[in-house]
Image (cartoon, helix red, strand yellow):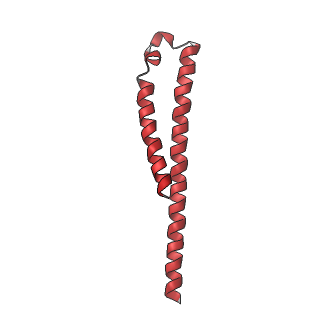
Amino acid sequence: MLAFFLLSQVAAICSNVWLSEWTSDPLLMNATLANTSQFAGRQNLFLGIYSALGGTQGTTIIIYIGVCVMWTTQLTAGNCFMRST
């Protein structure tokens, strides 16, 4: 359970670092290259990796929440069963 939370946090940190790398890339800061294939390829690379990091973060958070809900449900059901006997 904790592993999914930690993985989500690692993905968030990597996403922030990647975003700062993306915004400080010298090729992408050069406006005269905006309509070139080199610019588009570099932009797509940064966008693809940033999207993958965001997808990883979202997926791990959803799994973490699902595990927490299942664990809490089992804990509550066990407590209710123990009280009824």
Q: In which quarter of the image is residue 44?
A: top right
Judged from this view, the residue extending furthest toward the bottom is: 85
Q: Where is residue 2 in the image (x, y as percent from the top left)?
A: 47, 57
Q: Position of residue 28 (x, y in %)?
A: 47, 18
Q: How many marks?
A: 0
Is residue 26 left or right of 34 when viewed as pictured? Answer: left
Residue appearing at x 55%, y 55% in the figure: 63
Looking at the image, is 17 positioned above or below residue 40? below
Residue appearing at x 52%, y 39% in the figure: 53
Q: Where is residue 49 in the image (x, y as percent from the top left)?
A: 54, 32
Q: Quadrant of residue 38?
A: top right
Judged from this view, the residue extending furthest toward the front is: 3
Looking at the image, is 33 positioned above or below residue 67? above
Residue appearing at x 54%, y 59% in the figure: 66
Residue appearing at x 54%, y 35% in the figure: 51
Q: Where is residue 58 in the image (x, y as percent from the top left)?
A: 52, 46
